[in-house]
Image (tube, helix red, strand yellow):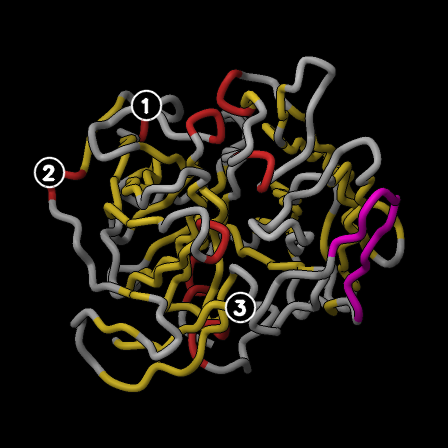
Amino acid sequence: MVCFIKVLNGFLSIFTAVSAGVQAKKTNAGAPYSANIINDTNVVHLDPQYFPKYHSERVKISYGPYTAPSNTNNSGMWSYFDVNITMPCSDCVITWMRGGLEYPNGTYANSNTGMWLHHVVIFNGGRASTTCGTSAGWLSRDRFFASGNERTPVDLCVNGTQKAGYYLKSNDYLAMVVELMNETPDPREAVVTITYEYISSVPQTFKPVTSIWLDIDSNCTSNSEMPAMANSSFEYSMEPPWTADFSGEINLIWGHLHDGGTHLEVLKNDNILSECVAAYGESPGYIEMASDESMNMSMSMDMDMEMVHISSITCNPKQSFLNIGDELSVQAFYNTTDYSPMLNSDGTLAPIMGISILYVATSSEWFYYDEK
């Protein structure tokens, strides 16, 4: 399948699928996209952590390498759209996922070495989006996994306490949007990794989860970004809310903000369902020494001129059931006085995001995953 994309303020506008095939192309906007370029040598088998009685498996799959340009070219950011990417399994249940970033030699890549996993989003082309199913092209498909540079795990089984997971049918196919940011003057390559834990069969006692994408720039536009504001506290709210057309137990809530963000509020019927709180500089990968080059990208620093970045976002959902007719929305809160925002290479404010994905465990019947 071939799709056209273009760069919009460092993110993507995804248009319509126009033909079959997996041949690499480049749009006239200059954003390259590629076919599935992964082979079995890029799959590493790890020790599973949950549900050994069901013969669970864990793999780390490497995608790429992708090239991020000089920090003088589009502030070092570049976006790729890969179709038909390697799946961890088929006719299986994914219970845990996490994004990562490495250099081609396998070493860790993060802001302390000037390379960011700005975003990665995985689409299931075999399933309609719950919130955007009537949109054009890939935006009508299910965005069931996402990660920013904070690399929050998507723990669908809640540390093994919930028998739930995301079902991949045998005829599903996946695509992935990758955006990298390079803070150095020289172009560099990096490899995106996704670690999956899954069960190869479909245990009858497990419930399938359905993902719900919530976005401050509404659900179904091509660009998930909003303008930042300097030296101020501000918030953005999703309008209008999304109205549920199915029911189930809310199993997990995931959230994403940019630097400068303090927290997200996920609302159900105008009441707080979950608060997702950002933490900064919790490990060395998210702390970098200020330099002329890196100061163009961020000004979040302490008195020792160390720049600190969002290193985790923790959501604390209240146990809740989603009913047909419930209204869901998200609010993003920023304080760019206490936590400085990202800057473009020309010193202007980079746009911000506020995204949440809810995972709802539905009936134990797996027929739900037939295409709508």
Disc 3 to disc 2, C-alpha distance: 34 Å
Q: Which residue is situated farthest in the top direction here?
A: 304
* Magenta-highlighted residues: 228-239
Who comes first in sequence, dot 1 or dot 3?
Answer: 3
Dot 1: element = helix
Q: Is residue 249 left or right of residue 263?
A: left
Q: Mark 1–mark 3 contact, CB under 8 Å? A: no
Who comes first in sequence, dot 3 or dot 2?
Answer: 3
Q: Of residues 349 and 85, which is closer to you in this image? A: 349
Residue at the spot 53% in from the left edge and 68% down from the top edge: 8
Q: Is residue 94 left or right of residue 216?
A: left
Disc 2 residue type (three-letter): Thr
Question: Mark 2 = which residue?
Answer: 41
Residue at the spot 50% in from the left edge and 72% down from the top edge: 13
Residue at the spot 54% in from the left edge and 17% down from the top edge: 283
Disc 3 residue type (three-letter): Leu
352 magenta-colored: no
Q: Residues within 10 Å of mark 2 (few under 14, many from 20)?
A: few
Q: Is residue 78 left or right of residue 62?
A: right
Query: Residue 129 location in percent, x, y?
Result: 52, 68
Question: Mark 1 = which residue?
Answer: 52
**Disc nearest the viewer among 3 and 2:** 3
Query: Residue 282 location in percent, x, y?
Result: 60, 18
Disc 1 residue type (three-letter): Pro
Disc 1 to disc 2, C-alpha distance: 25 Å
Q: Of residues 198 and 274, which is closer to you in this image? A: 274
**Disc nearest the viewer among 1 and 2:** 2
Q: Residues within 10 Å of mark 3 (few under 14, many from 20)?
A: some
